[in-house]
Amino acid sequence: MSLKFDFSNVMEANIGSTHGLSMENIEALSGKGLSALKEFRERAEKEELGFYNLPNQDALCDEIESYAETVRKRFDYFVHIGIGGSALGPIALQTSLRNSHYNSGQKPKIYFPDNIDPDWLHELADQIDVSKTLFHVVSKSGATAETAATMLYFMDFLTSKLEDDFYKNLVFTTDPAAGLLNQIAREYPIKCFRIPPGVGGRFSVLTPVGLVPAAIAGIDIKKLLSGAADMAAVCDTENMLENPAFMFAAIHYLYMQKGKNISVMMPYSNKLKDMADWYKQLWAESLGKRFDLNKEKIECGQTPANALGATDQHSQIQLYVEGPNDKLITFLEVEQFKNDVELKNHFTYIPEFDYLQGKTLGQLLNAEKAATELALTNNQRPNLTIKVEEVSEENIGAYFFLMEAATAFAGALLNIDAFNQPGVEEGKVATYALMDRKGYKQKKKEIEAMFAKKQFFVIG
């Protein structure tokens, strides 16, 4: 693991006292941080903080790797059915650690249909032979509407092709005992992997949720967990000022107090683009809360946004440099790209190209990052950098654990439950009611009454 956290450009020495922080500001929170760390350890021992223990799963890795080898021999296609935390982490693993054109030359081809757009799913169905496709259905409860609907959609194709043998093309990752998928698995001999107790969807990438598709794609999941374990040890230090997870959380917490309620994640690497998407869900769903642990209304949280360097220097940076100073930007930087060659000026009669002679695309990309960082800092716009030596299993595993631990620390500083999502549950209940799920008739009546009172303002 080689990962560095650079917070130089949030300190008042570099961006001034109006928008900068002092070490005294951060040190003042270290007592809360240490208390939180001790609580994390206690809850992890009781398996109430499941993500904390995930880096240590050697036996599970052996089981998954053996299963993945069988899958690669038997199937030509792999379709991962999940949404939210059941999809964003697995997608980020695939896009960061596999070739961008993986499906053009590898088998099984891997797909992540993480939405219920019927046209999109129809197009996927046209691309696969379901008789040669393994469908990985991921849901702790099995009741998630989008996951259940997508599974049922593909079941039409499976039963049509395979009849009573449809179950041979299914694998479930779900709760250890409860839930609807387990009901199905009790009727048919379907392979099941388990999501450990105390691990919510957005913290589940290092469970079979992410490890199964990663192993099938040929990612070294033991190295992934090794990197996470190394970062877990770093994030367990009691010196809070040397603890990167606490520092990331404390800096964001202090800027929330300053009214900077937008957290931008900006990778300067296409490989890391989906890591920012994963971060958005983790940060938004964990910290966006109406009430604190004392039941007092606080309506806290930051709106996460993502950008891609250098692409979004040509779309968003103007806003970040000269627009409202309400953002904290985190860059993801890669020090060494795996395929980086020197450029040559083949048009010697155009001297304007000469400055690129002998330089590499990686040098240019990181120079653009440094220039963006400089522009932000010169305009007193706080920014951070998470730097990895290279995009590797170890460093990706470290990044996942760092962000999860930082989220837990941020929840502790905000005095909220970072592991629930009551706002999401409210939407789920309304969806069930609108789709006439049994037991939600009264809720549907309430929704219909609300619509009846609604005043509509519509053009067209």
Image (cartoon, rainbow, N blue to C red):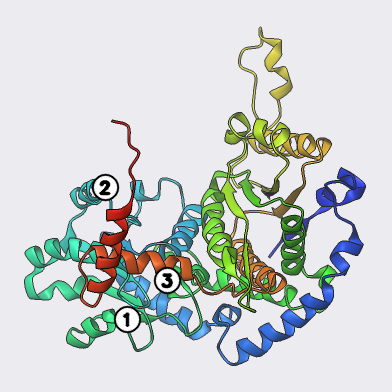
Q: Percent position (x, y) of residue 243? A: 78, 70
Q: Residues within 10 Å of mark 1 (few under 14, many from 20)?
A: many
Q: Residues within 10 Å of mark 2 (few under 14, many from 20)?
A: few
Q: Percent position (x, y) of residue 134? A: 26, 66
Left or right: residue 438 compared with residue 263 = left
Q: Which residue is mark 1?
A: 192
Against 273, residue 378 (above or below) is: above
Q: Percent position (x, y) of residue 264? A: 63, 48
Q: Earlier in the sequence, mark 2 or mark 3?
A: 2
Q: Which residue is mark 2?
A: 120
In the rendered structure, which amino acid carries the disc numbered 2? Trp
Q: Which residue is mark 3?
A: 209
Left or right: residue 211 compared with residue 321 = left
Q: What residue is shown at x 62% (from left), y 12% (from top)?
A: 347
Image quadrant assignment for residue 63: bottom left
In the image, farthest residue toward the top: 349
Mark 3 secondary-structure assignment: helix
State which quarter of the image contains the C terminus.
Answer: top left
Circles 1 and 3 in contact, beta carbons < 8 Å: no
